Image (cartoon, rainbow, N blue to C red):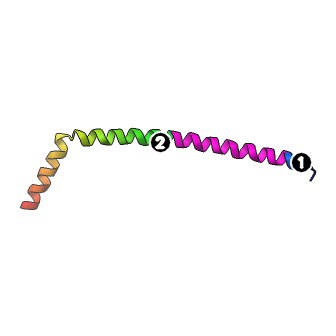
Amino acid sequence: MTLDEKFEALSKSYQSVSSSNQELKNQNEYLGHQLGEAMKQKKAALDSPSEFSHGDESEAESNVVE
């Protein structure tokens, strides 16, 4: 393999790795955004619990007492 062929092979390999790295960065950014949104929703749910969830807890407590 000549020096030019080696250089060309390395260049293609670098481009492939660089492209894969960019795809992973994009996925990481997307997943980070999704995680942030899920955490916001969870925090909102914990900050303002619904009446339904309190009803479940009361019912469960009454079942334990019985």
Q: Where is residue 18 in the image (x, y as percent from the top left)?
A: 69, 43
| Residue with the most extreme right position | 2
Q: Where is residue 58 in the image (x, y as percent from the top left)?
A: 11, 50
Give the mark nearer the N terminus: 2 vs 1: 1
Q: In this view, does 9 lie to the left or right of 19?
A: right
Say which quadrant the C terminus sits in. Answer: bottom left
Tally of marks: 2
Is residue 17 one of those drawn in magenta?
A: yes
- Read off the residue under disc 2: 32
Q: Is residue 50 left or right of residue 32?
A: left
Which residue is at a point 66% across and 45% down the rendered structure image? 20
Say whether marks 2 and 1 touch (CB < 8 Å).
no
Q: Is residue 7 left or right of residue 50?
A: right
| Residue with the most extreme left position | 66
Q: Is residue 25 left or right of residue 50?
A: right
Question: Residue 5, labelled with which disc?
Answer: 1
Q: Quadrant of residue 34?
A: top left
Which residue is at a point 58% across and 42% down the rendered structure image? 25
| Badge 1 amino acid | Glu
Q: Position of residue 1 (x, y in %)?
A: 92, 53
- Cα gap from disc 2 to disc 1, whole angstroms: 40 Å
Q: Where is residue 53 in the image (x, y as percent from the top left)?
A: 19, 45
Which residue is at a point 11% across and 61% down the rendered structure image? 64
* Badge 2: residue crowd in 10 Å (few <14, some 14–19, many ≥20): few
Is residue 61 one of those drawn in magenta?
A: no
Which residue is at a point 79% across and 44% down the rendered structure image? 12
Question: Which element carries disc 2, helix, strand or loop?
Answer: helix
Q: What span is colored magenta in the figure? A: 8-29
| Badge 2 amino acid | Gly
SS assignment for the magenta stretch, majority: helix
